[in-house]
Amino acid sequence: MGHDDYQQRKLHWLARIDSLYGLVQQWLARYAEKGQVKYDFHALVLTEELLGTYTTRTLGISLGQQHVVLRPVGVMLDTGGGRLDLEGHRGKVRFVLPDLASDWKIATKDGEYPAFEDFNENNFLEALLEVSSD
């Protein structure tokens, strides 16, 4: 891959992050309209060997007293696509793009034989509760 290919890959990755954030906000809109969910974005600087240093952002989601963060991890990972982590005080759930043209997946098992589920509103809400609920 040449320099231009890496730049295109980075731009595609950043667009995929933003589209995921938009989808999450769409799924949570009915709660946000009632003031039950609030969002905050923060700049995040990532450095990857082949892409160099670039800026993206995290999406913080506040649900009452609970706060979770969707945090991009990187695009040049073993998956060939990219990964974001949903982090809360009770743990972390990984969202994976098997490649940048694929749909998002939720990683349900790590290791030599990873397992993935389709990413949809129901299992996103389950993941949100998993990392945030007491």
Image: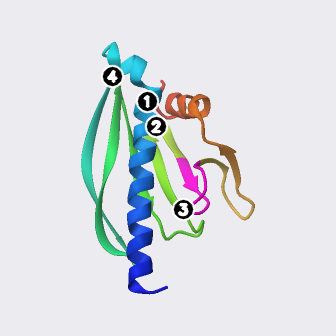
Q: What element carries label 3?
A: loop
- Give the labeled residue for mark 4: 65
Q: Is residue 18 left or right of residue 124?
A: left
Whichever of callouts 3 and 2 sits on the residue coming sooner in the sequence is 2
Indicate the amino acid at tag 2.
Answer: Leu
- Give the labeled residue for mark 1: 26
Q: Is residue 5 left or right of residue 117?
A: left
Residue range (magenta): 94-104
Whichever of callouts 3 and 4 sits on the residue coming sooner in the sequence is 4
- Give the labeled residue for mark 3: 100
Indicate the amino acid at tag 3.
Answer: Leu
Q: Is residue 32 left or right of residue 9?
A: left
Q: For the residues marked 1 and 3, what is the alpha-carbon distance in whole angstroms?
A: 22 Å
Give 72 or 120, whichever is nearer the viewer: 120
Residue at position x 40%, y 32% in the image: 25
Residue 99 placement (x, y as % from top left): 59, 63
Residue 28 placement (x, y as % from top left): 43, 25
Q: Residue 48 carries which label?
A: none
Q: Is mark 2 on a helix, strand or loop?
A: helix
Whichever of callouts 4 and 2 sits on the residue coming sooner in the sequence is 2
Circle 4 or circle 1, nearest the eye: 1
Q: Are marks 2 and 1 in contact (CB under 8 Å)?
A: yes
Indicate the amino acid at tag 4.
Answer: Gln
Q: For the residues marked 4 and 1, what is the alpha-carbon distance in whole angstroms?
A: 21 Å
In the image, residue 27 lies in the stretch drawn in magenta: no
- Give the labeled residue for mark 2: 23
Q: How crowded is mark 4: few (under 14 residues within 10 Å), some or many (20 or more)?
A: few
Residue at the limit of the structure toward the right, as seen here: 113
